[in-house]
Image: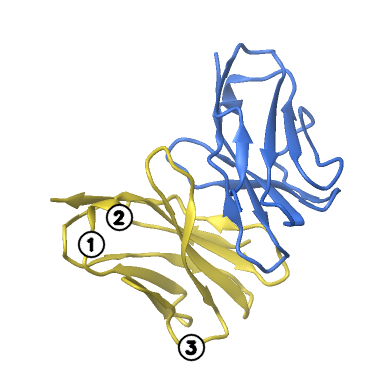
Amino acid sequence: AQTVTQSQPEMSVQEAETVTLSCTYDTSESDYYLFWYKQPPSRQMILVIRQEAYKQQNATENRFSVNFQKAAKSFSLKISDSQLGDAAMYFCAYRGVRDDKIIFGKGTRLHILP
Amino acid sequence: DTGVSQDPRHKITKRGQNVTFRCDPISEHNRLYWYRQTLGQGPEFLTYFQNEAQLEKSRLLSDRFSAERPKGSFSTLEIQRTEQGDSAMYLCASSLGGFETQYFGPGTRLLVL
């Protein structure tokens, strides 16, 4: 069975600094999708970034980028120029290509220090 | 595009009562998903629909849980004879197709006393 592990329950970063959230996963499949979702306090979850496993190039979305290491089964999220609005719970997630359900990690709560 | 909506946003009930939640997906999205999120955990998949057909159910979905999507639009999730362990956030998501991004609603927070 596929699993997603986020080893950092909480992290803090100074406003305008860069922070990296870690994620590892386990799967026997060769093709799949990986995601980072953001869940702000009392607000709905939104997709931050998505990576297809067959693509070697790391995905980027403005200040958000990933470091996808397929052999190591690692998928970290880098947030550059952190802003107060980035404070949220961040979930790393996996989905197989033949599967519709998403498997989530336990999340990392990110605090932004002004 | 008004996003995925869920009703109610909060529900407090006594153990043994039945509760029903509603999810309205983004219009034209044919896939609809239900997840459950307990405190300190990530969301866990419960079930999903393609149009009105329920295609997969998790083992988490006990006999007390039933989900429907009668006309392929909104969906309901009913929990019968609620237990304290059912206390959680119930999230609904929808997507345009099987490999498309899932958009989440705000969730229904259930507290069973």
- Mark 3 vs 2, N-terminal side: 3
Residue tagged 2: A86
Drawn colour of chain A? yellow
Mark 3–mark 2 Cα distance, whole angstroms, equals 27 Å
Q: Amino acid at mark 3?
A: Gln
Measured along the vertical axis of the image, is residue A107 above or below residue B36? Answer: below
Label 2 crowding class (10 Å Cα cut-off): few <14, some 14-19, many 20+? some
Q: Amino acid at mark 2?
A: Asp
Residue at image x 48%, y 55%?
Answer: A46
Find residue A48 and report its horizontal and vertical position in percent: 44, 63
Find residue B17 and report its horizontal and vertical position in percent: 69, 13
Q: Which mark is residue A82?
A: 1
In-image side of B45 versus B113 (left or right): right
Q: Which mark is residue A56?
A: 3
| Residue contact between numbered discs 1 and 2, judged by CB atoms under 8 Å | yes
Q: Are marks 3 and 1 on the same chain?
A: yes
Q: Residue furthest bottom?
A: A56
Q: Are marks 3 and 2 on the same chain?
A: yes
